[in-house]
Every structure is written in C-alpha cells, then in structure tokens.
C-alpha cells in the first residue's frame, strides 16, 4: 500500500480481483492499470474507482487515451490521473508514480518538512552484487524513485528478492535499498560468513573477503559528505585502493590480516575506512600524493589497530581514560606491536611502520608510546594523527558538521604548530571553507 515516501505493490491478476483488492485495502494511494485484462477491463475498473474513492489512476496501454470512451472525462475526474503509452520501462513508470506522489503529498510535506529526511534514514543502500553474494535470507527490497521516495520491488514473504535483482540487471541499477533493521541483519550475517570456517578454495575466500571490503567501503561512503570528500577524490581513492588490494591479494600474510580486520567491531572498520579517504584527501591537498606515499598511508589506515578487538578500547585517546591495568597495557603497547608485526611483511616500508607506531602521539608530547613533540613527529605521521582525531570527533558527534568550527577553535593552540601546522591549516580549509 502506498505512503507518501515509500510504496508497497499489491498485485491483481484481473479487473474483478483488482476491485476486490480496492474494497479490502483502504490505504491504497494509486492505481496502475492496463486496459486489456480478463474478467473486467481497465475501463470497468476505472468506472468502479470513480464511483468509490476516485484514487489517482494511471492507465498504461498500447492505444491512445482517445480510443477509450470510458476515459472521456479522465483528467476532469481527478487532476492526478495520468496516462502512459506502452511500451514503458520501469524508469518511466516510477517517474510517473513519483510525479503523482509529488502532487498528492505537497501539502503534507509543507506541514511536516522533516518527514522526508526521517523517511530516507529508514533505508540503507546496498549494491546488487552484495545482495546476490551475501544475502542468506529474504528481505523486503526497495528502489529509490525520487528524492526521499521509495517503491518496494520485492517482498520477503514472496521469496523473490534474487529473481527481482536479476530482472534489473539489464537496467544496471547501482543500488537497492533495505529497511534499516534488515540492513543491520544483512551486515551481521556477512560478518558471520567471514568469521566462519570456510572450506573453499583460496580464490573463493578472496572473492568473499574483497566483496565484503567493498561493502564496508559502501557503508562508510555515506559519511563522506561530512568530510567534504568530493566525488572526484573518491574516485582517486578508489583507484589507489585497487592497486593496494592487488598487492594484498598477492601477499597471503596481508590478506589474512585484512580478512580478520573485516570481522572487527563496526566502529573499527568505519574509522579505518574514513581515515583512508581523509588522509588521502589531505595528502592530495598537500601535494604529497605520489602512489607510494598513498599506498603506505592506506596500509597504515587498514592495519594500525589490528591488535585491538574491542571498539571501546579503539576509541581511547589517553591512557588516563582507563582504570583496568590489563586494558591500559593492551592500549599502551598495541601501536608498537602492530607496527612491528607489519614491518616484517613484504610491501610495508618505513613510512607505514612509523605511522602505525606514532598514531597515538599528540602535538604537545602527551601521547604514547614515545611522547613525541610536534617538532619531531614525521609529517606523514602528523597527517594520520590529525585525521584520526577529526574522524573520531565526527563519529562521536554522528557526523553533525555544525560542531566542526568549535572543534577547530579548541585544536588551534595545540595543533597549529611544528610539523602539524601546515596540515592543520589544510584540514581546516577543507572542512570549514
């Protein structure tokens, strides 16, 4: 049944059945009908509709509207009525429905301006190939047909999700949408699949892992607007990531660590991926973005917290935030242990080692494990440390960017100095200008 911002489809196999459906469902908003139907044609259905609730009626047929005398007063009967000439593809149908909805709910939207944003937040986008590869159960499936409006194209109880996805393959749909609760189930099932013992060939294990990584990037990209990362720069990062992932595929040790990384808490994965985008954006703005530099920074973003499994510990900025001696020791040594573990692997150079080792240092020397001051922290480490602080701030504040100005004011005295100075200025320019 239709609502102003999302649609479920109720089907009828003939005109008489359609009339019964209308009698039984008072919350239907729009009728989409062919003319030629068994038992009762589109004209008879139209007359039934006008005599009852006079819902907006979209007639889709191969003929002309003038060919059917039942529709002589079509546009007078309801100004929202519409005509589609066959053949019409899905995009044309959805656009027509969208136009009717826009007119139908305009007054409601004026009264409740926040409703559209609230409704859109109820859905999460997923690439079709991820659903085909990872979905282990049926979900209600939606397409976005306009700004904040969705149409349901598959129903969990009908068990038709994957057949619907295949149906849309020729149309090259970029994303389908799941309801938020279903989306969370889907993500958890995907993580469970990665954690489970896999009795497949290495090639298939890699396929699952890298598809899951692609899914993780899709999730994180919803937050990139807050970091002012342009589409052009996203493409730059994605191209760089392809080269990094090629290297990881060829290195079994790096691959195993990456697979384990993807099973960590959501915060740790999101935090790492957002740092990949923002650090590379900073490097680009600073003119430090040669292939090798970006590659080593991406390694550091992926692997800097590989010794942390608890997202609560991953969020610690100062050891003074902890009271448990065991937890203090885990956080205190994790950067050094991760750096030493990565240093032994082929493809990781001293830049990545130092970034991982230094990522909890602070400009005033109050960080750990070495207590480095701003003047003796390597510039590449400074880029990561600053990005790390800003990304964590945005995650904590649910990506509400209105707090960034006060954040930078608070950072000014501590961060605008030494090897951080130019990087701080660049980050402020990106996020505030």
Image (spheres, rainbow, N blue to C red):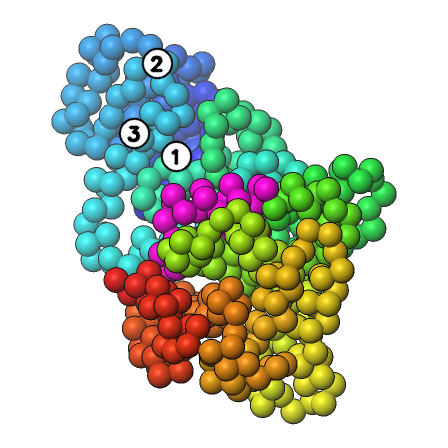
Q: Cα distance, mark 3 to mark 1?
A: 21 Å
Give the residue displayed 63% in from the left and 44% down from the top.
Answer: 245
Question: Which is the main secondary structure of the residues drawn in magenta?
Answer: helix
The range drawn in magenta is 215-243
In percent of width and height, residue 208 lies at 70, 42
Give the residue pinned by disc 2.
86
**46 up-or-down from 356: above or below:** above
* Element on which disc 3 rests: helix
Give the residue pinned by disc 3.
96
* Element on which disc 2 rests: loop
- Tell me the tag on residue 65: none
Return the disc, 2 or 3, that comes first in the chain's sequence: 2
* Element on which disc 1 rests: helix
Return the disc, 3 or 1, that comes first in the chain's sequence: 1
Left or right: where 274 falls relative to 117: right
**352 up-or-down from 167: above or below:** below
Nearest to the observer: residue 111 or residue 326: 326
**23 up-or-down from 93: above or below:** below
Crowd around label 3: few <14 · some 14–19 · many ≥20 (10 Å): some
- Comparing labels 3 and 1, the label whose residue is closer to the camera: 3
Locate residue 92: give its quadrant: top left
User: Magenta includes 218?
Assistant: yes
Give the residue displayed 25% in from the left and 10% down from the top.
Answer: 64
Left or right: where 147 falls relative to 277: left
Q: Cα distance, mark 2 to mark 1?
A: 24 Å
Give the residue displayed 44% in from the left and 38% down from the top.
Answer: 143
Residue 377 shows up from this direction:
yes
Q: Quadrant of the C terminus?
A: bottom left
């Amino acid at each position: 049944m239709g609502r102003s911002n999302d649609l479920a489809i109720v089907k009828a196999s003939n005109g008489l059945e359609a009339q019964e459906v209308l009698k039984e469902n008072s919350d239907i908003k729009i009728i989409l009908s062919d003319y030629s139907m068994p038992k009762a044609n589109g004209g008879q259905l139209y007359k039934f509709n006008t005599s009852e609730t006079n819902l907006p009626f979209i007639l889709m047929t191969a003929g002309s509207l003038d060919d059917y005398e039942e529709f002589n007063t079509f546009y007078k009967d309801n100004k929202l009525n519409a005509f589609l000439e066959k053949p019409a593809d899905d995009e044309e149908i959805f656009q027509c429905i969208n136009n009717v909805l826009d007119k139908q709910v305009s007054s409601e939207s004026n009264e409740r301006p926040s409703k559209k944003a609230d409704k859109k937040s109820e859905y999460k986008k997923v690439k079709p190939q991820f659903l085909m590869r990872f979905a282990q159960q049926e979900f209600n499936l939606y397409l976005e047909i306009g700004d904040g409006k969705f149409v349901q194209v598959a129903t969990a109880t009908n068990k038709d999700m994957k057949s619907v996805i295949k149906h849309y393959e020729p149309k090259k749909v970029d994303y389908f949408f799941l309801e938020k609760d279903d989306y969370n189930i889907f993500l958890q099932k995907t993580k469970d699949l990665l954690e489970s013992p896999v009795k497949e060939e290495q090639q298939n294990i890699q396929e699952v892992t890298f598809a899951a990584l692609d899914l993780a990037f899709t999730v994180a990209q919803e937050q990139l607007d807050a970091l002012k990362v342009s589409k052009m720069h996203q493409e730059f990062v994605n191209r760089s990531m392809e080269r990094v992932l090629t290297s990881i595929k060829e290195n079994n040790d790096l691959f195993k660590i990456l697979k384990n990384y993807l099973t960590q808490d959501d915060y740790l994965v999101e935090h790492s991926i957002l740092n990949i985008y923002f650090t590379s954006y900073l490097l680009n703005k600073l003119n430090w973005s040669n292939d090798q530099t970006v590659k080593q920074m991406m390694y550091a973003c992926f692997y800097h917290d590989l010794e942390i499994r608890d997202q609560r510990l991953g969020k610690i900025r100062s050891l003074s935030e902890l009271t448990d001696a065991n937890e203090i020791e885990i956080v205190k040594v994790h950067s050094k242990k991760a750096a030493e573990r990565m240093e032994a692997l082929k493809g990781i150079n001293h830049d990545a080692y130092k970034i991982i080792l230094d990522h909890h240092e602070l400009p005033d020397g109050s960080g750990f494990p070495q207590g480095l001051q701003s003047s003796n922290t390597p510039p590449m480490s400074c880029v990561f440390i600053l990005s790390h602080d800003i990304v964590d701030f945005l995650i904590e504040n649910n990506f509400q960017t209105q707090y960034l100005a006060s954040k930078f004011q608070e950072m000014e005295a501590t961060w605008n100095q030494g090897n951080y100075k130019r990087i701080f200025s660049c980050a402020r320019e990106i996020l505030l200008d």
